[in-house]
Amino acid sequence: MSDSVHKTEAVAPVVGFVKRAGDHSGKTADYDAYIRDLEDRRNRPVHYRPAKQEINLVVALDSELSALEAGATDFEKSYGQPNTELIESRKIVAELTARLAEEQAK
């Protein structure tokens, strides 16, 4: 391209042009719908607030402490004890695996 070609930049319309082109109120065509939506949004939290729940702190705390005590007692009784169910299951799996290997070898 040659340097003699003049390049022009796009120019945004000025405020005067916008005012002359249409409505002078500044409102959009869907202004009423916009206002209704704003009112709905303002009122929405009122409808979705959770109801206040009364909590008896003593009862709630007592039940949690009882659960904690039961867990501690269970831990004291079972800690260090062999898991007999797991040991028996492994023995059965080993026996069945050996039988399967014998049958496949035949």
Image (spheres, grey):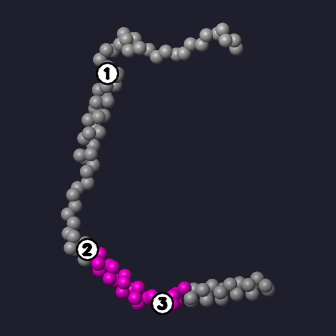
- For badge 1, the amino acid type reads Lys
Query: What segment is highlighted magenta in the picture?
Result: 63-86
Do residues under tags 2 and 3 come within 8 Å of each other at their CB atoms?
no
Position of 85 with respect to 102 (left or right) is left
| Principal secondary structure, stretch drawn in magenta | helix
Q: Secondary structure at mark 2?
A: helix
Establish if 55 lies above or below 74: above
Q: Which residue is mark 2?
A: 61
Furthest-front residue in this view: 3
- For badge 2, the amino acid type reads Leu
- Nearer to me, 69 or 89: 69
Q: Secondary structure at mark 1?
A: loop
Q: Which residue is mark 3?
A: 80
Establish if 27 lies above or below 22: below
Alpha carbons under labels 2 and 3: distance apart: 30 Å
- For badge 3, the amino acid type reads Gly
Q: Secondary structure at mark 3?
A: loop
Give the image location of residue 64, x and y in percent. Answer: 29, 75
Mark positioned earlier in the residue sequence (1 or 2): 1
Mark positioned earlier in the residue sequence (1 or 3): 1
Mark positioned earlier in the residue sequence (2 or 3): 2
Establish if 62 lies above or below 91: above
Q: Quadrant of residue 39?
A: top left
**Residue at the spot 29% in from the left edge and 78% down from the top edge:** 65
Position of 48 with respect to 90 (left or right) is left
Q: Which mark is residue 36?
A: none
Q: Which mark is residue 27?
A: 1
**Residue at the spot 32% in from the left edge and 30% down from the top edge:** 34
